[in-house]
Image: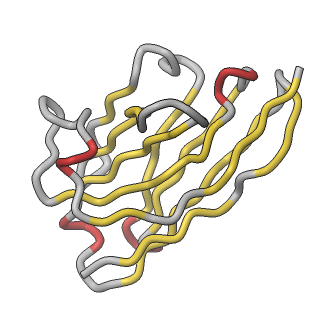
Amino acid sequence: QVQLVESGGGLLQAGGSLRLSCAASGRTFSSYAMGWFRQAPGKEREFVGYISRSGGSTRYADSVKGRFTVSRDNAKSTVYLQMNSPLPEDTAVYYCAASQRATYSACYYPGLYDYWGQGTQVTVSS
């Protein structure tokens, strides 16, 4: 069983940078692939990024590719989302999630993930 807690969200202006953290409790963090998702008001939850169990493979939504980076530190049981040059359209609640099934080829759907954090709000102003 894994419990996830996101942190690092807040209010910032476009052109700044922000790093979100997701801390996991439990003994088997490294056995889970991790994903980041986001949800804006009135929209469905959408995929942002994926990282494999070892951290050796990542995959991103086209909308954030080149601006956001997912990383993980298994020794600290933590996954990160580095947000560079965020835009107002990046405003959303950001969630981390853990999966025993997600792979590089199948990582986009929320239904693949077994555990979810409660989310952290990111608001980007112009």
Report the residue at 60% width, 36% height from top: 41
Position of residue 96 measured from the top left corner of the image (x, y, whole percent): 44, 55
Q: Which image quadrant: the C terminus?
A: top right
> In the figure, residue 73 lies in which quadrant?
bottom left
Quadrant of the image containing the N terminus: bottom left
Along the line of sight, the residue nearer the viewer: 54 or 126: 126
Residue 88, picture quadrant: top right
Image position of 83 with respect to 122: above or below: above
Q: How many marks?
A: 0
Extreme residue in the front direction = 42
23 vs 17, left or right, is: left
Which residue is pictured at 20% across the width and 48% down the height? 111
Q: Is residue 14 left or right of residue 115?
A: right
Image x and y of residue 38, in percent = 50, 40
**Residue drawn 37% across the image and 67% down it:** 74
Give the x, y percent position of residue 20: 62, 52
